[in-house]
Amino acid sequence: MKILSIITQKGGAGKTTIATALAVAAEKDGLNTAILDLDDQATSCFWGDIRQGLNHAPALAVKDVKAIRLPHVLEALKSAGCDLVIL
């Protein structure tokens, strides 16, 4: 399992936009992909909720996670056969 982290302290830099676009591209390439949203605003989760409501969009795993639980969640995704996790 590969883990890709999109990180910067500055808000409004495009982290969520890049993370969601990469996740969609990875899913289209056949990778079992998950987005873990560590931001308190949970914008990726909001995006996932809206996307899930669209008929043409396949389900993409998006979950809000507190940093302290990250190792546990990553291990569970690895055990479940996830190919790529985007943080």
Image (cartoon, rainbow, N blue to C red):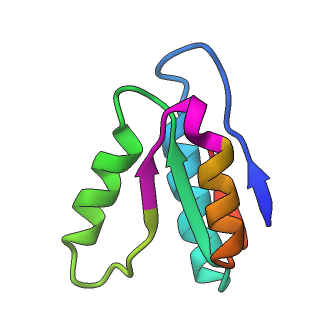
Q: Position of residue 12 (x, y in %)?
A: 47, 22
> Which residue is at 58% across, 46% downward?
18
Pick the quarter of the image with the C terminus. top right
Q: Position of residue 47 (x, y in %)?
A: 32, 52
Where, by quadrant of the figure, is residue 84 drawn? Answer: bottom right
Q: Position of residue 48 (x, y in %)?
A: 34, 58
- Nearer-the-camera pick, 67 or 83: 67
> Which residue is at 46% across, 29% downward?
39
Q: Is residue 73 above or below residue 64?
A: below
Q: Residue furthest right?
A: 2
> Range of the magenta residues?
62-70
Q: Is residue 45 above or below residue 67?
A: below
> Which residue is at 29% across, 84% downward?
56
- Nearer-the-camera pick, 65 or 14: 65
- Verify whether residue 24 appears in magenta: no
- From where the camera sits, is residue 55 visible? yes
- Verify whether residue 68 appears in magenta: yes
Where, by quadrant of the figure, is residue 8 drawn? Answer: top right
Q: Residue furthest top?
A: 10
